[in-house]
C-alpha cells in the first residue's frame, strides 16, 4: 500500500509551530467503503523523542525547533472489505528538512532563562554570543495558540554586565500551552543567528518569599506557623521546605530539612531537643507536582529562632529584680512618711509643752507682781 503523497511542511510564522500537509495516495483514490487513516510520527527535538498520532485528516500541526533538522514519518492505514475488516499498514515514508545556518558566526545568544515570578509577570533573560559584533541589537518575538500573529517583546530590560531580557505581564501569557520565543538581532556585520525556544510557562513559576513566620513553644514542642506567599499562585499548588538549625549545649550545630507536601499546610511542629540551646527556622516554597511539571524554589524567608535557655532566664531575673526594687521603693516611701509623721507629732508636743510652761509662768508672775509692788508705793 502506497504512503501518502505530496508531503509538505509549511511555516505560518509561529516560531516553530509548523503545519504538515499530505494527500491521499493515487492508488487509493477510487476505493469505496474503506476507512483510510494516517499514522504520523515526528521527532520532538525539545524532548528528544518521537511522538505519534493517528488521524483521518490530511493535515497536522506540531511544534519543532527550527534550528534543528525536522523529521517526519508517515504511513497509510487501510481498513475495508478487501482487507477482511482488519487494519493494514502501508510503507512508512520519511521526510527530513535540515535548515541552513544563517547569521554571523558565534552570534547566537547564550544562557537563556525564564522565570515566572509569583504568576504575576515573567522575565526571560540571556547573554550575548561570544562572537557578537559591537553595536548589535537584540529583538525578541513570542507566540502562543491564542494569538493570530507573533508579537515583539512588550518591555525590554537591561541588566548589569551586558545581560538583557524581556518582561511579560501576566495578561500576555498562556499556561498549559506551548509558549514560543525567538531572539534574533542585527549588527553592522549582518544579522545575528536566531535562537528558538518553546516552554510552558506554568513550569517556570517562582513564588514570592514566605511571610509572617512565627515560632512558639507549647508543651515541649516547637511550633512553626507562617502565611502563604503573596502573588497569584493558589495555596493548594504550593509545597514548602522547612530548614531547622539547632545549637546544642556542646556547641555543635544540627541541621535538618523537611519538605511538606500536604496541601494548604502552613504549620510545622517538632519536639524540642533536650540539650538544645536555640533552634532557628526558615522556609521557602515551590509549586507542587499537582499543578506543574517543574518550577523554582522561592528565596528563603527571614530566619526565626527560639530563645536561648540562658536568655530565657534573664528576663525572669530582671523581672524579679524590678519587682524587688519597686517593693523596696514603696517600703522606703512608707517608712519616710511614717518618720515625718512621728517627727511632726513630737514637734507639736514639744511646742504645746513650751506654751503650757510659758502660760503658767505668766500666771505666776501676774500673781506675785502686786505683792512686790505694793510696799513700794506705800
Image (cartoon, grey):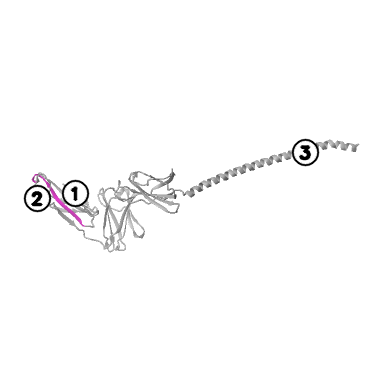
Q: Neighbour class for label 3 at 10 Å: few (<14), some, many (≥20)? A: few
294 shown above or below 99:
above
Checking the image for residue 27, the label placed there is: 2
Query: Label 1: few (<14), some or many (≥20) within 10 Å?
Result: few
Camera-side mark, 2 or 3: 3
Mark 2 or mark 3: name the one nearer the start of the chain. 2
Q: Residue at x 70, y 40 (%)?
A: 346
Residue 299: percent from the left, percent from the top? 37, 51
Report the predominant secondary structure element of the magenta stretch. Answer: strand
Which of these two is toward me, 210 or 173? 210
Q: Which mark's residue is nearer the viewer, 2 or 1? A: 1
Residue 306: horizontal and vertical position, in percent? Answer: 44, 48
Q: Residue at x 84, y 37 (%)?
A: 368
Element type at marker 3? Answer: helix
Q: Which residue is mark 3?
A: 357
- Distance in Å between CA atoms under marks 2 and 3: 155 Å
- Above-or-below relation of 166 to 263: below
345 sits to left or right of 117 = right
Q: Earlier in the sequence, mark 3 or mark 1?
A: 1
Contact between labelled residues 1 and 2, with CB atoms less than 8 Å apart: no
Q: Residue 75: within the magenta?
A: yes
Q: In this figure, which residue is indicated by the disc labeled 1?
A: 53
The answer to whether residue 306 is left or right of residue 118 is: right
Q: Position of residue 53 (x, y in %)?
A: 19, 49
Mark 1 element type = strand
Look at the image and give the residue range highlighted in magenta.
Answer: 69-82
**Image x and y of residue 44, in percent:** 22, 53
Amino acid at each position: 500500500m502506497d504512503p501518502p503523497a505530496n508531503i509538505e511542511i509549511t511555516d505560518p510564522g509561529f516560531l516553530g509551530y509548523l503545519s504538515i500537509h499530505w494527500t491521499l495516495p493515487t492508488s487509493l483514490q477510487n476505493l469505496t467503503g474503506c476507512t483510510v487513516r494516517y499514522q504520523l510520527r515526528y521527532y520532538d527535538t525539545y524532548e528528544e523523542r518521537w511522538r505519534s498520532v493517528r488521524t483521518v485528516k490530511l493535515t497536522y500541526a506540531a511544534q519543532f525547533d527550527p534550528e534543528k533538522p525536522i523529521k517526519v514519518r508517515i504511513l497509510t492505514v487501510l481498513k475495508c472489505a478487501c482487507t477482511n475488516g482488519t487494519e493494514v499498514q502501508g510503507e512508512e515514508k520519511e521526510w527530513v528538512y535540515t535548515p541552513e545556518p544563517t547569521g554571523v558566526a558565534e552570534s547566537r545568544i547564550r544562557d537563556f532563562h525564564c522565570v515566572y515570578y509569583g504568576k504575576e509577570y515573567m522575565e526571560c533573560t540571556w547573554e550575548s554570543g561570544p562572537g557578537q559584533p559591537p553595536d548589535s541589537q537584540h529583538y525578541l518575538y513570542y507566540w502562543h495558540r491564542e494569538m493570530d500573529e507573533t508579537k515583539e517583546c512588550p518591555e525590554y530590560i537591561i541588566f548589569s554586565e551586558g545581560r538583557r531580557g524581556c518582561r511579560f505581564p501576566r495578561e500576555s501569557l498562556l499556561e498549559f500551552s506551548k509558549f514560543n520565543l525567538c531572539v534574533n538581532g542585527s549588527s553592522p556585520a549582518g544579522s545575528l543567528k536566531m535562537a528558538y525556544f518553546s516552554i510552558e510557562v506554568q513550569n517556570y513559576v517562582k513564588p514570592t518569599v514566605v511571610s509572617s513566620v512565627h515560632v512558639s513553644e507549647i508543651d515541649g514542642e516547637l511550633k512553626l506557623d507562617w502565611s502563604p506567599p503573596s502573588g497569584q499562585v493558589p495555596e493548594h499548588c504550593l509545597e514548602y521546605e522547612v530548614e531547622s538549625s539547632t545549637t546544642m549545649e556542646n556547641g555543635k550545630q544540627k541541621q535538618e530539612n523537611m519538605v511538606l507536601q500536604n496541601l494548604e499546610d502552613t504549620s510545622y511542629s517538632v519536639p524540642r531537643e533536650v540539650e538544645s540551646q536555640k533552634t532557628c527556622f526558615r522556609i521557602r516554597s515551590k509549586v507542587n507536582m499537582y499543578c506543574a511539571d517543574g518550577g523554582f524554589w522561592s528565596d528563603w524567608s527571614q530566619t526565626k529562632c527560639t530563645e536561648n535557655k540562658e536568655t530565657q532566664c534573664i528576663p525572669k531575673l530582671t523581672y524579679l529584680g524590678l519587682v524587688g526594687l519597686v517593693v523596696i521603693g514603696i517600703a522606703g516611701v512608707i517608712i519616710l512618711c511614717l518618720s515625718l509623721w512621728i517627727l511632726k507629732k513630737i514637734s507639736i508636743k514639744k511646742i504645746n509643752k513650751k506654751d503650757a510652761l510659758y502660760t503658767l509662768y505668766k500666771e505666776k508672775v501676774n500673781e506675785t507682781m502686786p505683792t512686790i509692788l505694793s510696799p513700794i508705793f506705800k
